[in-house]
Amino acid sequence: MESLISKSSGKIKTYEVSVGYKPRPLQKQVHESLKRFNVLVCHRRFGKSVLAINELIKTATSKPRSKLAYIAPTYRQGKAIAWDYLKFYTRPLMAFGGDRNESELRVDLYNESRIQIYGADNADSLRGMGFNGVVLDEYAIMSPRVWTEIIRPAISDTNGWVIFIGTPMGHNQFWEVYDYAKRGHKDWFGQLYRASETEIIPPNELIEAQAIMTEEQYNQEFECSFTAAVSGSYYGKLITAADNGNRITKVPYDPEIPVETWWDLGIGDSTSIWFVQRVAEELHVIDYYETSGESLYHYAEVLEKKNYKYNRHVAPHDIVARELGTGKSRLEVALEIGIDFEIAAKLEVDHGIESVRNTLPYCYFDRENCKIGLDALRQYRKQWDERNQVFKNKPLHDWCSHAADAFRYGCVHSPIDTSQWTKPIYVDTKYIV
């Protein structure tokens, strides 16, 4: 039930309009418990998307000219998951005025409030916007930068609220905001809802799901386990082994040992850089940097500010491609500004992944400096084939890809000699200039 206020002939009229939302007891409990920052770890079919959409509508109707955002991991997912819900629950409000834009997934209400659906795959387009309320759906599979660099500043001047919702994907950024909320910080609310406890899904359905899913999948999707391995992850178990073996710790820079950098270069996409020192048979991964939309000049400045002593910079093979605007390759531009790249071999991706797997047991990572990169390696995973219900033998391209690709280029360019791989590997050298 939403309250609408209108002015007619100088008089204020108040209307009570039902949007058709009848929350379950647990949903109602959530609405009543919400604070400014909220982390809801919910099992599948809990009804978290419907809950979140109606919380956006509540703010939109009670606060004229408010700006509200529902952000999914991708724009396509946002349209599939939330757009129909948003249209359905705002339909009764359209009788009082407003507009609906199908191409922009946007609803403008009678009081000039706006609710819009976005994708975190184009999160930089949100920079500079201000919001009164934001829902981050499936935050576990978004880049951590979406919250820290984009959304947190976007709600500062409006004193806006945020709801993180989703299911776990290992100990990553979603775990961190949940853990922060549970530690009793002011203005934070966090709660975890397991299918075995909520009684929303009938027991026989859970039994059938458990019978056809792996233990990891079931514990992650229905029991909201943060410790279950990420399904389809290439390196998740190896990163966990590194953590258990105290190889994710404080790894200081040794000025007596040169640093090599491993790059994945993007323009619209992110550019990722790993900073690595070789100490005997160990790789000390001391730092990581990632951003997007910047030129090579920006990254040259980053290298200079870090003030490491460099001995090599490793780039992917496509750095030799010439750009139409300048007629120069990024390899040539980089050399002009003082970055002398070595080019990684153009191996098939699965061979590169094998090289990373052989290398990770010898790596020590700085826990703080490499945090975002580590989260990306932990979540880098195979594509899921919805039709055949199996994992494809190819990586999913998402925010994790850039860090994982950069690490792979470094591993194949100068690998640790530990592999027992005997199958011949074809190396394409035609790109070398």
Image (cartoon, rainbow, N blue to C red):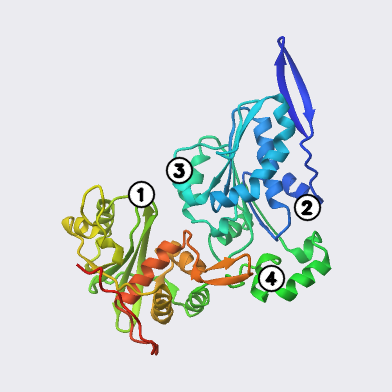
Q: In the figure, 262 relative to 101: above or below?
A: below
Check disc 2 and give the amino acid type: Leu
Which residue does the image show at 32% across and 50% down from the upper left?
294
Numbered disc 3: secondary structure: helix
| Marks 3/1: CA–CA distance | 11 Å
Q: Earlier in the sequence, mark 2 or mark 1?
A: 2
Residue of label 1: 293
Numbered disc 1: secondary structure: loop
Check disc 4 and give the amino acid type: Tyr
Check disc 1 and give the amino acid type: Gly
Residue of label 3: 125
Q: In the figure, 412 relative to 140: above or below?
A: below
Q: Quadrant of the N terminus?
A: top right
Q: Is residue 128 left or right of residue 409?
A: right
Which residue does the image show at 71% across and 20% down from the upper left?
6
Where is residue 221? Give x, y as percent.
67, 65
Give the class, few, some or many, for how many residues have Cα within 10 Å of label 3's Cα (few <14, many ≥20): few
Give the mark toward the camera: 2 or 1: 1
| Picture disc at residue 218 | 4
Q: Earlier in the sequence, mark 3 or mark 4?
A: 3
Q: Is residue 20 left or right of residue 283?
A: right
Where is residue 410? Give x, y as percent.
33, 72
Which residue does the image show at 56% across and 39% down from the upper left?
103
Give the class, few, some or many, for how many residues have Cα within 10 Å of label 4's Cα (few <14, many ≥20): some
Numbered disc 2: secondary structure: helix
Where is residue 288? Give x, y as percent.
37, 63
C-beta proximity under 8 Å, tags 2 and 1 = no
Residue of label 2: 26
